[in-house]
Image (tube, rainbow, N blue to C red):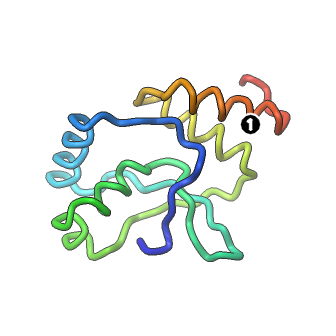
Amino acid sequence: MKKIQANAYNPNKVAPPEMKLLYDSIKEDGYTQPIVCYHIKDKDVYEVVDGFHRYMIMKTYNDIYEREGDCLTVTTIDRPISDRMASTIRHNRARGSHDADLMSNIVAELVEMGKSGN
């Protein structure tokens, strides 16, 4: 888990009651989905594309951290930054809400990178 880091572009926010529900879910069922990451080879770290809040549960709750032995299951994607940003949006739209300002920033960045509104 020490090699996992957040990305700088995720516009998804989870309110405290939903974070508590996520904690309860992970406590009862374990991690049922891997964290989606991109491996930054030159730094040998894994940047979260999807699963930041699941990652934060382990960082925040010592009981989960100890039970999981400081390990998270991850799956990696090897895509350019614009595709990773789009992937984050797709994952978030399936289950969360977005901060409007952060969302407009990410859309502007995607437009600058030549992405269309798929």
Quarter of the image with the C terminus is top right
Residue 115 left/right relative to 104: right
Quadrant of the rendered image containing residue 107: top right
Residue 117: x and y in percent read 73, 23
SS of the residue under disc 1:
helix
Quarter of the image with the N terminus is bottom left
Q: Residue furthest front?
A: 101
Amino acid type, callout 1: Glu
Residue 13 left/right relative to 59: right
Taking the spot 16% from the left edge, 47% from the top edge, the residue there is: 24
Residue 70 left/right relative to 108: left
In the displayed structure, 8 sits above or below 88; it is below
10 Å crowding of disc 1: few (<14), some (14-19), many (20+): some
Residue 42: x and y in percent read 71, 76
Residue receiving disc 1: 109
Residue 13: x and y in percent read 41, 36
